[in-house]
Image (spheres, rainbow, N blue to C red):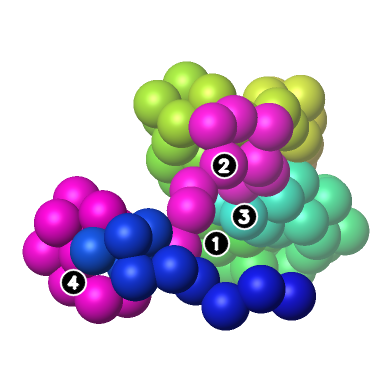
Amino acid sequence: MAAPTSENTEREHAATGSEYAPPARAAGGGKSGKALASLILGIISIPAAFLPIFGVLFGILAITFSSLGKKEIRRDGMTNMGQATAGLVLGIVGLTLAVALWVIGAIVVESSS
């Protein structure tokens, strides 16, 4: 590997104001960690709905991360919009299921007393 020439080093220094160039950022095609987190939390929210507090918590987190992930994907041209959408849908299903089971549980407890 050839050592950088002084001309290249001077050009980089002039362009960045530093001797070291910042790390290159992908022009698109990256993946959003928030979208992946949304998908994982959405998947977890469905079985967690049987313990309604956890189902509500994971569902809300999945919906929130999905929204943040979709915004990041649109802004930075990333490629995993499907993960964010799936996380949103699963988060809504988990949240709805948790609330429904909570209400059903309250009705059963109320009617048995």
Residue identified by numbered label 2 = 26
Q: In the rendered picture of this protein, how many numbered marks are placed on residues?
A: 4
Residue identified by numbered label 1 = 57
Q: CA distance from mark 1 to mark 2?
A: 34 Å
Question: Which label is found at residue 18?
Answer: 4
Q: CA distance from mark 4 to mark 3?
A: 30 Å
Residue type at numbered disc 1: Leu
Picture residue at 56% right of the left edge, 51% below the top = 34
Task: Identify the image quadrant of residue 81.
Answer: top right
As drawn, 94 above or below 93: below
Left or right, residue 51 beside residue 70? right
Residue 70 x, y percent position in the rendering: 51, 29
Q: Chief secondary structure of the magenta span?
A: loop
Mark 1 or mark 2, earlier in chain: 2
Picture residue at 55% right of the left edge, 61% below the top = 57
Q: Which residues are magenta?
A: 11-32
Indicate the secondary structure of the residue bearing disc 2: loop
As drawn, 108 above or below 67: below
Residue identified by numbered label 3 = 33
Front one among 96 and 110: 96
Mark 1 or mark 3, earlier in chain: 3
Q: Nearer the viewer, mark 4 or mark 1?
A: 4
Mark 4 or mark 3, earlier in chain: 4
Front one among 8 and 91: 8
